[in-house]
Image (cartoon, rainbow, N blue to C red):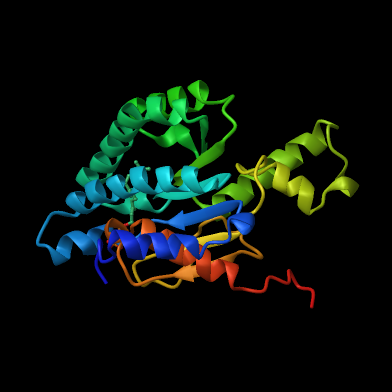
Amino acid sequence: MGGNLMGKNGLLELKEKIDLDRIPKHIAIIMDGNGRWAKKRFLPRTAGHQEGMKRVIEIVEVAEKLDIKYLSLYAFSTENWKRPKEEIESLMKLLVQYIRNELDRIHKNNVRIQTMGDLSKLPRLAREEVERAVEKTKNNSKMILNIGLNYGGRDEIIRGIKNILEDVKMGKLKEDHIDEKVLNNYLYTYNMPDPDLLIRPSGELRLSNFMLYQIAYTEFWFSDIYWPDFKEEHLYKAIIDYQSRNRRFGGI
Ligand code: FPP
C-alpha cells in the first residue's frame, strides 16, 4: 500500500467513523521503514528520513486536531548509534531542522515538547535545540509531544532503578513504598498515562526496546506500509480499529 490512496471524500467518511468521545489519550508510534522506503525508490536512506520528517509534521498536526493528549514518537534509539556516521549526522540535522521550522507553530498551538532518553550523548547543536524547545514549551497544556531520543526502554528502567536506590539511600523514599506507581514516577513518562495505542508501520512485529514498562496493557496496531507513506488516513484507521477492541486490563 502506498500513500495518498484515499480521496477527500473517503478520508472524511473514514474520519466520521471515529468516536470522538473515545479518542485514545496517548498514542505511541515506532516510526519505521524510512530506509526501505528510500531503497525501493533507489534513493539514499537519508531521503527516507527526510520524507519521514514530513510525516512527523503532518501527524503531529492531525493528532492536535483530534485532541490526542499525548503523542510519543520513537525518533532515535540507544541502538541507532550503530548506524553509519553519515546517517546519524543526517538524522541529527533533521531533528534540528524540525525544531527550527516547527517550534513556533507547535508553541502557538499550546503543545509541550518533552523527550525521553539520555540527551547528554546527542551532538551539542541537536541537544541545545531540543533543550530550547523543551524550555520554551514547558508551560503548554494542549498536548505533550514526547520524542524518544537516544531512548531505550531497558535503559530507562535501569536509570529509574538507580534513581530509586539513590533516593532510598538518601532517606527520601522508603523501600516498602516502592510499587508500580513509584517506579512509574522515575521514568521519563512520569507525567503521562500509559499509551493506549501503539502504532508500528513497516511490517515488523516487534517492540524494539520501546516503552517496555509503559506498554503492559497497550493495544497494538501494525501495518505493512513504510513510515514515509503513513498518512492521516492510516492514523484514522488505527484509531477506528483501536475503538473496536475490548480492553479488559486483565479483568473479564
Ligand atoms: C526507522 O526507519 C526510523 C528512524 C530510525 C528514524 C526516525 C526519524 C524520522 C522519522 C525523522 C526525524 C524525526 C524527527 C522527530 C524530526 P529505518 O531507518 O530503521 O528504516 P528501515 O528499517 O527500512 O531501514
Q: Residue furthest left?
A: 42
With 137 as the anchor, is 227 left or right in this view?
left
Q: How many numbered discs?
A: 0
Of 81 and 72, nearer the camera is 72
Classify 2 as above or below 160: below
Whether residue 131 is visible, yes or no, is yes
Classify 192 as above or below 243: above
With 58 as the anchor, is 206 left or right in this view?
right
Of 195 and 214, nearer the camera is 195
Q: Quadrant of residue 91?
A: top left
**Residue at the location (78% across, 46% down)?**
182
Q: Quadrant of residue 189?
A: top right
Q: Quadrant of the C terminus?
A: bottom right
- The image shows residue 114 at horizontal and vertical percentages of 52, 35
**Residue at the location (58% across, 44% down)?**
69
Of 164 and 224, nearer the camera is 224
**Residue at the location (28% across, 32% down)?**
97
Q: Quadrant of the N terminus?
A: bottom left
- The image shows residue 134 at horizontal and vertical percentages of 50, 27
With 121 as the anchor, is 195 left or right in this view?
right
**Residue at the location (76% across, 73% down)?**
250
Of 54 and 234, nearer the camera is 234
- The image shows residue 127 at horizontal and vertical percentages of 40, 29
- The image shows residue 174 at horizontal and vertical percentages of 88, 41
Whether residue 200 is visible, yes or no, is no
Classify 131 as above or below 201: above
